[in-house]
Image: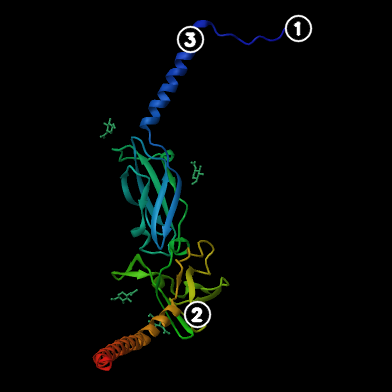
Amino acid sequence: MTTPAWPRLPRLETAVARTLLLGWVLARVADAEGTPVRAYNLTWKSTNFKTILEWEPKPIDYVYTVQISSALGDWKSVCFSLTVTECDLTSEIAQDVRQTYLAKVLSLLPNNTGFVEDAHYRNSPEFTPYLETKLGQPKIESFKQVGTKLNVTIHDTQTSVRSNGTFLSLRDIFGKNLNYILYYWKASTTGKKTAMTNTNEFLIDVEKGQDYCFLVQAVIPSRKVNKKSPESITVCTRQEKGVFREMLFIVGPVILVIIIVIILSLFLHKCRKAKARQSGKENSPLNIV
Ligand SMILES: *[C@@H]1O[C@H](CO)[C@@H](O)[C@H](O)[C@H]1NC(C)=O
Ligand SMILES: *[C@@H]1O[C@H](CO)[C@@H](O)[C@H](O)[C@H]1NC(C)=O
Ligand SMILES: *[C@@H]1O[C@H](CO)[C@@H](O)[C@H](O)[C@H]1NC(C)=O
Ligand SMILES: *[C@@H]1O[C@H](CO)[C@@H](O)[C@H](O)[C@H]1NC(C)=O
């Protein structure tokens, strides 16, 4: 028995095959430079309705165009001939934040205006702003501690969503679905308490004369995703210092008067002593003589 021999190419044929292979590789490389690459990793980045679509890769010798459509509408081209990999779609989704939107990214040669092959565009995931836009970090607008009450007011952030020509706030859009959680604790301890409101204001009971620290967080309990915002920065009341300052304000002038009286009486005492000594001097020679 003989082992089957693999067919061998003659030398000439091998050389031709190599050349062909090299040619094919070179052709692919050249091709890659000029051919639009299909976009991938399409991602919605959205906070407080400010909405940007991002994708990869960075284009070389071609451009991107983005189209958007709501479930009801036609496709509309928004960003044209982009050499970057993002497109701001805020003004499109702001027209109806409860709609579900779909976007697609087309890869085109710079002067291409015609038909786009399947291979040269990709659809984004669906996006419903009302359900999915992230809640931005809330800001504490003002706070006041009077006696046993602490009043905290949260800034109602304005969005780029318009109605009748005016910009709507988060509260305008979400109504009572938008809640805020207050985390608060005595400045001297770490045990946190929480309170919740469906307005932008807290009025909570605290201990008189105690300093408190607190922060807030926005939450939409009915949501499945992106329920909570990041936490606000922490702020603290300055109750004792306030009292101290008030006391200083009242007691200050009294102390000043007392100090003046002491200095004056010391001065007068010295004067009297000096006078007494002088009269003593005037008398003593007489005594000696
Ligand atoms: C898409 O992005 C994720 C992270 O953002 C990354 O891990 C993944 O590799 C990307 N996909 C491709 C095809 O590059
Ligand atoms: C498009 O651009 C290519 C090179 O980038 C050029 O050869 C071609 O003539 C252009 N076509 C039109 C219609 O301008
Ligand atoms: C809490 O403070 C806000 C802003 O200073 C004020 O408008 C509101 O009336 C206060 N609420 C109470 C109950 O004092
Ligand atoms: C917008 O304005 C019209 C007329 O000015 C009014 O009827 C309508 O209720 C307003 N819509 C909103 C959301 O304010």
* Neighbourhood count class around disc 2 (C-alpha, 10 Å): few under 14, some 14–19, many 20 upward: some
Q: Quadrant of residue 118?
A: top left
- The image quadrant where one finds the N terminus is top right
- The image quadrant where one finds the C terminus is bottom left
Ranked by sequence position, the earlier of labels 3 and 2 is 3
Q: How many marks?
A: 3
Nearer-the-camera pick, 143 or 199: 143
Q: Quadrant of residue 52?
A: bottom left
Ranked by sequence position, the earlier of labels 1 and 3 is 1
Q: Is residue 71 visible?
A: no
Residue 149: x %, y % from top left: 47, 84
Task: Say which residue label 3 marks.
Answer: 15
> Quarter for ligand 2?
top left
Nearer-the-camera pick, 203 or 66: 203
- Mark 1 or 2: in front is 2
Residue 240: x %, y % from top left: 45, 79
Task: Say which residue label 1 marks.
Answer: 1
The amino acid sitting under disc 3 is Ala
Residue 187: x %, y % from top left: 51, 73
